[in-house]
Amino acid sequence: MTREPGDSMSRRLGLRRISRRQALRYGAVGGAAVFVGGGVASAQATPTASGDTLESAIDAILADARYAPSRLGIYVADLHTEEALVDIRGDEWFLVASTTKLFTTAAALDALGPDYQFVTPVYRTGPIGSDGTLDGDLILVASGDLTMGGRDTPDGQIEYTRIDHINATAFPELVTLTAQDPLAGLNDFARQIAESGIQQISGDVIIDDRLFPAIEKDGYVLTPVWINDNLIDFVVKPGEVGAAATIDWRPKSPTFQVEENVLTVAADEPVSLRVTSPAPGQLVVEGQIPVTMAQAVPTFQIDDPSAFARTLLIEALARAGVSVAASPGGKNPVDELPPQGSYADADQVAERRSLPFSENLKLVNKTSHNQHADMLIMLLSLHNDETTFEAGMLAVRSIIEQAGIDPADVALGDGRGNLYTDLFSPHTVTRLLAYMATRPDFPAYSASLPVLGVDGTESTTVKPTSPVAGNAAAKSGTTFDDDPINQRGVVMTRALAGYLTGRSGRECVFGVYINNVPVGGLDDILTLITEHGSIVEAIHDRT
């Protein structure tokens, strides 16, 4: 099960059953470090005015005994010359977690371009009578649009929050929903359809989802149609202790019946919520929420996105004054679709164009959006006239080769960074970053990255008053798993790679990776993240 408190944590960890006060046993990071300055290898970091070396600064940051089994890798280079400034196991492979997305988003940007737009049309299959009746079906042809207008802001951006709702299963108390209506795109379709003269539909409403076959992956479905990330969000707020909590949910659909069974408990009790579906169209929200918690946001993953989209579109049509003879419930009737490619321009009754693809990249990298990162792999596959995930992964090789990197130096198994075969070195990722900075589409790439101390998943990696805040843009990743014999977890990797302006004004690329850190709970992981930020601060002070 995925666990993701903001910076794309992945794999499994029973954090909630482990006391946050549990004592841990740690030790210093061992192994030789090589620091390089002026193009000549040196055993010492460039000293500061006080005489401190980077090596001693890192030793102080990682002095706690918990780092005894850990392995540290750092590579820092001048952005423009790629001159190595710091090299600590820089050419060794590390587990990279969501810094994988640096490659995925680079490859997708290269293939599609920052201005690419998803175009989603709606067609009719019959004539419109004088009374406004469509004698036929209405068909929405899914294009792979990742947000379908459900996050669009009035000023033309895709909205995101620091902790996205895709992370709600693990950390419902940390999620903040965006303000936008997730049904905005479907409502726009319905408005256009009504304006086309259609007042009622005698046939069916169908989602043409044949762009590529749906793929089950990591607890979600990669699909050509996405509405609200194919999730139902529940906002749970406590009442008085012993009383029922209040529950609201979105997107609203009368097709779903929601049973509420959440109790308000004392402040020292944990939040524990789950959403199940014991029967089609029936959802049960149950568990408990402490009285002092403002709210929690559990979610329910839709297992049939096409049927979900069909239902919501039929209901949007009703709100726009268009009646549909077919029931909004049930399966998407794909057996009634005409041959692919047979739609006529004259039969188009609605169309949506997405915001520029550069906005999608922000959502992927700023929030470490796993579902969308894997969808980028499918978009790469489609770009090469293929329809398989494997073909999309092969397409990532193009950006690797363009960057002058030997593909054998990179092992990637997915787009999000969830596999133990997602591996590369700190040096390798800095080569990609340096290459991307030479491209005309670099502004879109760099703007997609979280800014340390400012926004996205890295807003709390350093304090807002840190000299690094606003001077580093980087993608992070954290993979952890259970250690049941010790009733703890292990952070298999904490990764951070991106761009940094040093104290001297020097522009750098960097990768900082720490593997194998035992943890007792979420607080320990958050401490590791801030200590990771302290390493970046030490690098900033010495470059």
Image (cartoon, rainbow, N blue to C red):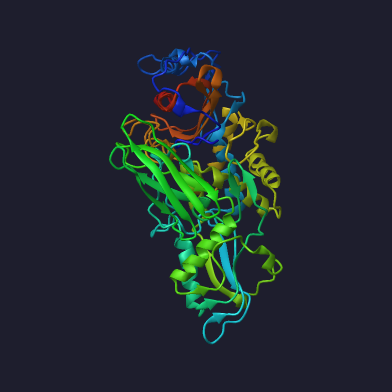
| Direction left: furthest residue | 240
Quick one: 80 or 416, which is closer to the camera? 416
- Percent position (x, y) of residue 306? 59, 58
On screen, residue 164 above or below 531: below
Q: Residue at x 68, y 68 (%)?
A: 336
Question: Can residue 217 be seen in this snapshot?
Answer: yes
Q: Residue at x 55, y 21 (%)?
A: 484
- Percent position (x, y) of residue 196? 51, 78
Could you say which quadrant of the image residue 479 lies in? top right
- Percent position (x, y) of residue 291? 30, 37
Could you say which quadrant of the image residue 52 lies in? top left
Q: Residue at x 49, y 14 (%)?
A: 44
The quadrant the C terminus occupies is top left
Quick one: 169 or 384, which is closer to the camera? 169
Tally of marks? 0
- Percent position (x, y) of residue 517? 51, 20
Residue 142 relative to residue 237: left or right: right
The quadrant the N terminus occupies is top right
Q: Residue at x 51, y 43 (%)?
A: 369
Could you say which quadrant of the image residue 307 lies in? bottom right
| Direction bottom: furthest residue | 130
Quick one: 36 or 428, which is closer to the camera? 428
Question: Can residue 447 be seen in this snapshot?
Answer: no
Quick one: 139 or 541, which is closer to the camera? 139
On screen, residue 184 above or below 470: below
